[in-house]
Image: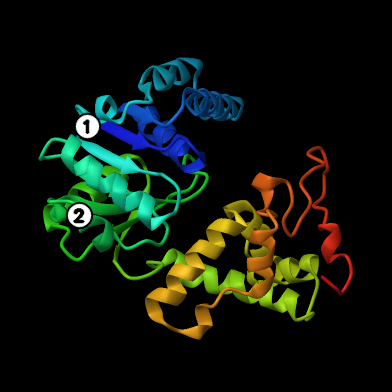
Amino acid sequence: MKNITVIGSGTMGNGIAHTFALHGYSVSLVDLNEQALTKAIDIIQRNLDRQISKSKLTENEKIATLNNITTFTDLKGAVAEADLVIEAATENEAVKSRLFNELDDLCADATILASNTSSISITQLASNTKRPDKVIGMHFMNPVPMMQLVEVIRGYRTSEAVTNTIFTLAAKLQKTPVIVQDYPGFIANRILMPMINEAIYSLYEGVAGVMEIDTVMKLGMAHPMGPLQLADFIGLDVCLAILKVLHEGFGNSKYAPCPLLTNMVAAGHLGKKSTIGFYDYRQSDAKELIVASRFSNSRF
């Protein structure tokens, strides 16, 4: 396996492309417009520079990594020689389903199709293809170049051979692959999102403030980041989408998104990417986290 195509150049897509290119794979990075791709390459370059500054990479390795990435706006050209296609598009089942249907027509019969989805059914995505045995989940963690885990999600009809191939591939990236079965939220988000949702409910019900909730989990449970700050970093819209998948998939009220989360997403307060969520990120040079003004009193 030499040629990897990554669809989507956002946070996850450019991180996946960075990681494969760093390990010597030929990467085709595809997005809808050239501007998004230019931004992605700039981010990858800055992240490589950060690795150099920490003596984890040499300048020559940076140059080789960048040379391993070719950008495309044309999906057909991007997947023409792909051994593996990794979809990292928006977390929307309809979008992903259409994409997998298109990929099935464009890709060679032997090409493996993977999704970086954090919650959507691999079996459902595979049903849009004539190769369900070659469809699998590769759920990378953010930031991809640093985080060790890859959830390898085996769909209902994913073959043993494809599962083993992807497991081995993830290990070659110096990641730790873990095989899980295809049920809503898999393992990572089935456990993480109810915790984040409960933290939001605790804030919503006035049990404690933003900083207090996060401090309890950091100092009392040895979490490197509190659940509300983590939700901001994931994106509150992504958290809401995953909780909806869990709620609909299991039909259990314990997964129902907190009304406060729903309101924040509707208001466009999505966390770090929108500069405001539970915390205010507009002061980029601030040394300490600043709680969003809406949460500085008991009424919100």
Of the image marks 2 and 1, the number of the one nearer the N terminus: 1
Residue 220 at x, y percent in the picture: 69, 73
Residue 279, numbered circle: none
Mark 2 highlights which residue?
Answer: 163
In the rendered structure, which amino acid carries the disc numbered 2? Answer: Thr
Is residue 42 at all visible to an observer of this figure?
Answer: yes
Camera-side mark, 2 or 1: 1
Q: In this view, does 63 lie to the left or right of 1?
A: right
> Which of these two is toward me, 114 or 253?
253
Structural crowding at the residue carrying mark 1, measured as other residues with C-alpha within 10 Å and reported as few (<14), some (14–19) or many (≥20) = many
Looking at the picture, which amino acid does disc 1 mark? Ala
How was the colour assigned to the protein in this rendering?
A: rainbow
Element type at marker 2?
helix
The image shows residue 203 at horizontal and vertical percentages of 74, 74
Q: Does residue 226 show up?
A: no
| Above or below: residue 170 compared with residue 191 | above
Question: Is 296 left or right of 163, judged from the image as shown?
Answer: right
Q: Quadrant of the N terminus?
A: top left
Instruction: Using the numbered discs, state the Cα–Cα distance from disc 2 to disc 1 in whole angstroms.
Output: 18 Å
Residue drawn 55% across and 26% down? 39
Position in image of residue 291 (x %, y %):
82, 58
Q: Is there a contact, CB below 8 Å, between mark 2 and mark 1?
A: no
Image quadrant where residue 112 sits: top left
